[in-house]
Amino acid sequence: MVSCTKLNRVPKRAAHEAAVRGNVLAGIPLGSMQVYSLAGNANPGSVDSTLTWASFSSPNGVAVDGLGNIYVADKNNHRIRKVTQGGVVTTLAGSGQPDSTNGHGTLASFKFPTGVAVDATGNVYVADSGNHEIRRISPSGDVITLSGSRQGYTEPGPAAAALFNGPNGVAVDGAGNVYVSDAGNYRVRKIRTDGFVDLMAGSGNPGFSDQRGDLAAFDQMAGLAVNASGSFVYVADAGNHRIRRITAIGDVSTLAGQDNAGNMDGGPGVASFIFPAGVAVDPSGIIYVTDKGNGSNRIRQITPAGVVSPFAGNGIVAFLDGVPGVAEFKFPAGLATDATGNVYVADQGNHRIREIGITAMVTTLAGNLIGGGRTGGAQLTSPDGIVMGPSGSVYVSNGRARQVLQISLSTGFATVMVGSGGIGYQDGPGATAMFKWPVGLAIDAAGIIYVADEPDNRIRKITPAPAPTLGIVGTVAGNGVEGYANGPALTVAEFDTPDHVAVDAAGNVYVSDGYNNRIRKVTPAGNVISLAGGTEGAWHDGRGDSARFNWPGGVAVDPVGNVYVSDYLNNRIRKITPAGDVTTIAGTGEAGSRNGPAGSAQFDGPDGIALDAAGYLYITELGNNNDIRVISPGGIVSTLAGGPQGYLNGVGRFAKFSVPVELAVDPAGAVYVVEEGNHTVRKIQ
């Protein structure tokens, strides 16, 4: 957590509108599945802006890269758009005039682009339907024609000489091979990495036939998708109301669907579709389909065995965000999935990009926007720390009031556990004890609470006691002198602005010693040692005092003794082994809000940190983001909740926080956040 002291030394930056992803995080109940509008609004247009202030015109294709950036084939605007992790919509390429021109960014032109895909290196591929071409956009925005020049068809041969007829969909596999649904030619084509165009399947005439290669037949092909290995290509065969599957050697089979159009769920031979338009496959092999036809307007999912079930949409042709069974779409077209299981939909008739995923609902448990505001019982004034307590309660360090509170989770009623409210240093029972400004909290298995009394440079503890006392305050470490010294905890040890604490199963207490840029350890025997870090603020991985932090923030400890640290000014998350080896587990060091693989993710002032039983790390951010981030055990960073700095309850990115300094997680996966800026305790469920 960051106290008023740190906030004065490191001023907060202005908040910006950071888009928050709803994420499916396997193994923990983060919240309810939701459908919401990621970007765009009801009015067709081509405005580059943020979130729903941006506009699209009949977006048709959508793709997502490994960093979570979303690419959109904005069909009627003749542009390729990009939606960043921060929710900012820009034009990646395209002048807006229907033409075929190569060049950089908006100097290039497209004509009714319908499909889009992105490879592992960030190249974007476009099915430029009106130009009968396959285009490629480099990460820097340079547009070239990969293959095609005019309407037609050529037998397998060099890409430079190949012709296409209204290509509708495009996909790329892990090796860089590009797959095309060549709709007007009723064929699926493959552009190999060596520049040769092959026929995968299709006779060239409309029809239906499950056979190999050119003996197979399709009708009105739309989108297609390929798994990472290239072993299966999935085709939305709209005219046949089927999803077809093509093996690497060109064998075509029907995965789901039948002659009769409909929206029946079930296994092979039972399920039906109405003009399926888009198809995507996630890493686990689940296939997602936009069932676009009138009478469906739903998102469906198919298991690898061909069992179809509903995913989102109630069938009404309209617009409505909400839980999947209530949400409404209007002719959904392309769709894509990301690494964490979110599904993105080009909702063509609504001119929006929609997102379907697990998103967190934020509510206020206690406090209000006015410092000292009362929601029941004691007042919350600049709360700084939080831990889960027994019997449905949390403990909160009420910083400015110099108290520690116990708050009921069911009623929000806050009771003063310890602290007279006066400024000073005094151990003792209940209301006789005094703090200077209690910040970070930790709790051990016996219910003893550890408190970082930041300006007093001491670590205190609260031993639970029967009512009416509730708790007895003692001192664990620190002689009250601002400085740096190891040794006997009560007489020799010195700290300089300690503001976070954690405790392990053996009773070792870990302290984030702010101005000393160290992580300290208080042993059960009463000795203070330096676990890692050095006096000067810097960044360096290494062992013990060779490692460097730059104002370490929150600390958390796992069951085997690894300590996790929010390295505030380094914009990184660090890990310290029991032997003192320090590594960086997430963050590039550059301030930002990028999600994705931990090594390329960005943080902006990470502060509070908590670890749940499944190994997920939750982090509060105090920079431009003012949000709550999550790192999965597999090393994927995502955003759980929060947006522009402010105060607002709601789902995921629509919620707002102000100076969220610390958090705790209960056994059911609910996250509790204390906000110094809003004087509240918020719950994310």
Image (cartoon, grey):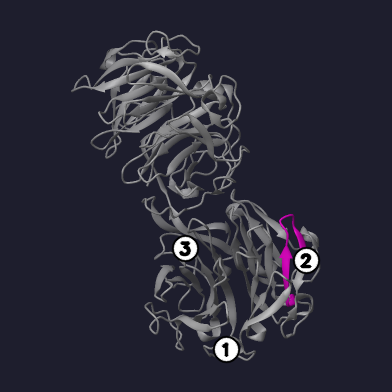
Is 583 placed above or below 218 here?
above
Residue 620 position within the rendered picture, expressed as x and y whole percent measured from the top left: 48, 37
The amino acid type found where label 3 is placed reads Leu
The amino acid type found where label 2 is placed reads Ile
Q: Which mark is residue 217?
A: 1
Residue beneath disc 3 = 320
Mark 3 or mark 1: whose residue is earlier in sequence: 1
Q: Which mark is residue 144?
A: 2
> Mark 3 falls on what kind of element?
loop
Q: Residue at coordinates 28% horizontally, 25% vertically from top-left? A: 448
In the image, taking residue 456 as reference, residue 172 lies left or right, namely: right
Residue 94 position within the rendered picture, expressed as x and y whole percent measured from the top left: 75, 63
Which residues are drawn in magenta?
Answer: 131-143
Separation (CA) of disc 2 from disc 1 = 31 Å
Q: Please check the rendered image and state whether residue 7 is part of the magenta-colored stretch, yes or no.
A: no
The answer to which of 568 and 624 lies nearer the viewer is 568
Q: Nearer the viewer, mark 2 or mark 3?
A: 2
> Mark 1 falls on what kind of element?
loop
Question: Residue 14 lies in what quarter of the image?
Answer: top right
The amino acid type found where label 1 is placed reads Ala
Separation (CA) of disc 3 from disc 1 = 37 Å
Residue 357 position within the rendered picture, expressed as x and y whole percent measured from the top left: 46, 58
Mark 2 or mark 1: whose residue is earlier in sequence: 2
The answer to which of 221 and 562 lies nearer the viewer is 562
> Mark 2 falls on what kind of element?
strand
Question: Residue 109 lies in what quarter of the image?
Answer: bottom right
Is 116 placed above or below 53 here?
below
Disc 2 residue crowd, few under 14, some 14–19, many 20+, Cα 10 Å: some
Q: Which mark is residue 384?
A: none
Disc 1 residue crowd, few under 14, some 14–19, many 20+, Cα 10 Å: many
